[in-house]
Image (cartoon, coloured by chain):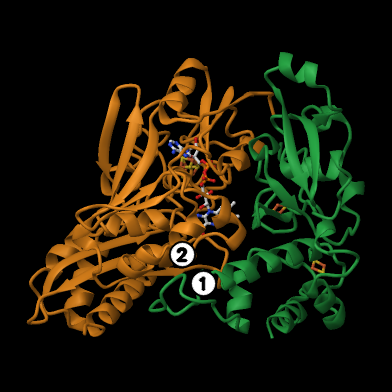
Amino acid sequence: MSAAHPPRDPAATDGAAGRSHDPAATGGDATRPHDPAAADRDDTRSRVTLQVNGAPRDLTVDHRATLLDVLREDLGLTGAKKGCDHGQCGACTVLVDGRRANSCLLLAVAQDGAEVITVEGLAAGGELHPVQQAFLDRDAFQCGYCTPGQLCSAVGVFAEAAAGHPSHVTDPARPAGRGPVELTREEIRERLSGNLCRCGAYPNIVAAVEDVTR
Amino acid sequence: MKPYGYVRATSVEEATAAHAARPGARYLAGGTNLVDLMKHGVEEPGTLVDVSRLPLDTVEELPDGGLRVGATVRNSDLAAHPLVRERYPVLSQALLAGASGQLRNIATTGGNLLQRTRCPYFQDTAMPCNKREPGTGCGALEGVHRDHAVLGHSPHCVATHPSDMAVALAALDATVHLHGPDGERTVPVTGFHRSPGDHPERDTVIRPGELITSVVLPAATAGLPSAYRKARDRASYAFALASVAAVLDLADDGTVRGVGLAFGGLAHRPWRARLAETALLGATPTDRAIAHAVEAELGLAQPLRDNAFKVPLAHNLACRVLSELAADRP
Ligand SMILES: Cc1cc2nc3c(=O)[nH]c(=O)nc-3n(C[C@H](O)[C@H](O)[C@H](O)COP(=O)(O)OP(=O)(O)OC[C@H]3O[C@@H](n4cnc5c(N)ncnc54)[C@H](O)[C@@H]3O)c2cc1C
Ligand code: SF4
Ligand code: FES
Ligand code: FES
């Protein structure tokens, strides 16, 4: 499988263009058109319902399909990117039931019933999420490949810090869950370490996230 | 990847029965290790038995003051649990030193304990590897092994266990609770992972079809001063080159009444440093006494061609953590 999904060059901004649609190359289609009857007959596929950016989506998924593949290939949501496909880069980060997660390691079938928010769903009512606006204001990207993952990850970080979740750099003597953790630059850098940026736009990414917390 | 079946279990019994009934069944928890290895072709399940929604997702206070951590509690939730943070700081710190925020949100207690080695030969099906395919040889022994073991390895396998959490659990004397076809049993974390010996394909003593249901943190180590420290190639989001978990209990006169010391990144299992502990028991933990004790343990080290640096690294980490804990006493 590693040969079928070579590490993508992050400089290629259009992630959709890079994926092979040859079933032989990917070991069979990840998913097929919604066909409930076929899914019932076949123990390699299942029907699932996902709430994606607020809308229910009924799908028949091959058990091998990751959430990332389903979002990109079936639902046309190409915001979440396939960088490494192995949990090592964060480009595929989305919010699942309000928590940030690497969609490349989540099997779609196991997410049945989940609420998924992708970068396409961050802007509410045509207004950018404050962190999206801050990325624009701070010029927090170069090629933009890592950006959707950075944005979803940052939104997850705000919730985690608000809930009082500590990080590796939080004072060990600080109890958990008692009031929000202040997002200093050090905290932001640590908490966003799961999102790599091949262009090295880190200083402006940290500054943008910091702007939102002020 | 070959097609496979999928079953979502709603109870422990249903999970073990589904596992027993299907050839090539594998439990799926967060999937952050299993799905990764399936993509590499290292794992080829016939059926995935999804245990991620089992009602094992809580941290419960036990009557004796210990904590029972369900197998499906997410690593992030465990690290942020107020009682874990307060009574078992080494565990919260070890979890937070591992992986990334988004991975910890997915990864579970059971899956973390059972994650496989990160040895690159193990992950590459074109390479020889006794752990993946017994009898093919160990690619790392004379190959790339800077990240590999210095303690307890065998000529058959020099891999390390990658978990940070397990190192803290070993120092805390935690126990693993299992449910299997033959009923329930409990195994101490220190006896859960194996040394490679002649059978590197077996990481742990878990039996076929057994399900981890919980991990229990004992009352005996609750509230003791404890800490975790990890050295890695970058400041965050990297596996340990070496790490140390320490729990220190000092008597009123300042001598060591109890100590749990475990190393990560050095061996096929979390390495409980019994020699160092014995040397420290009853002693006043001066910098000198600590250094001697740690030396006694690391004297067992047999580094490979390219990883001798791990020995002084682990030594310094252990001395630092222990002396900080000794100095911190109220
Ligand atoms: C890029 C990256 C970086 C990482 N960095 C670190 C790090 O620095 N430190 C660290 O400690 N870890 C690190 N990890 C590993 C991560 O912590 C593990 O992948 C995770 O803890 C596994 O948990 P899971 O629930 O996802 O397990 P899964 O992938 O679902 O399962 C792992 C194994 O456990 C079995 N299993 C799961 N639950 C049970 C159960 N209840 N009973 C019986 N068997 C079960 C599965 O069958 C499988 O064999 C990293 C992972 C990645 C991808
Ligand atoms: S060290 Fe172990 S896992 Fe790595 S190649 Fe050798 S046998 Fe395989
Ligand atoms: S694509 Fe790199 S972490 Fe998912
Ligand atoms: S990878 Fe290019 S902007 Fe981050």
Name the chain under label 1. A
The residue to which callout 2 is attached is: B80
Residue A192 seen in this snapshot: no
Is B21 rendered above or below residue A175? above
* Left or right of residue B60, residue A59 in this image: right
B267 or A214: nearer the viewer: A214
Q: How many labels does the image show?
A: 2
Q: Which residue is the site of mark 1?
A: A164
Determine the image quadrant of residue B256: bottom left
Left/right of residue A11 with respect to residue B101 in the rendered view: right
In the rendered image, the vertical position of residue B183 relative to residue B95, given as above or below: above
Of residues A95 and A90, the one nearer the viewer is: A95
Q: Where does residue A208 sit, x and y in percent of width and height?
A: 76, 80
Q: Kindly identify the residue that appears in the image at 29 percent across and 25 percent down.
A: B183
Depth order, front residue of B206/B62: B62
**Amino acid type at mark 1:** Gly
Asked whether the residues under marks 1 and 2 belong to the same chain, the reply is: no
Look at 84% across and 27% down and name the residue there: A34
Q: Residue furthest top?
A: A41
Rendered colour, chain A: green
Q: What element carries label 2?
A: loop
Question: Could you tell me if residue B163 is visible in this image?
Answer: yes
**Colour that chain B carries in the picture:** orange
Name the quarter where the N terminus of chain B is drawn: top right
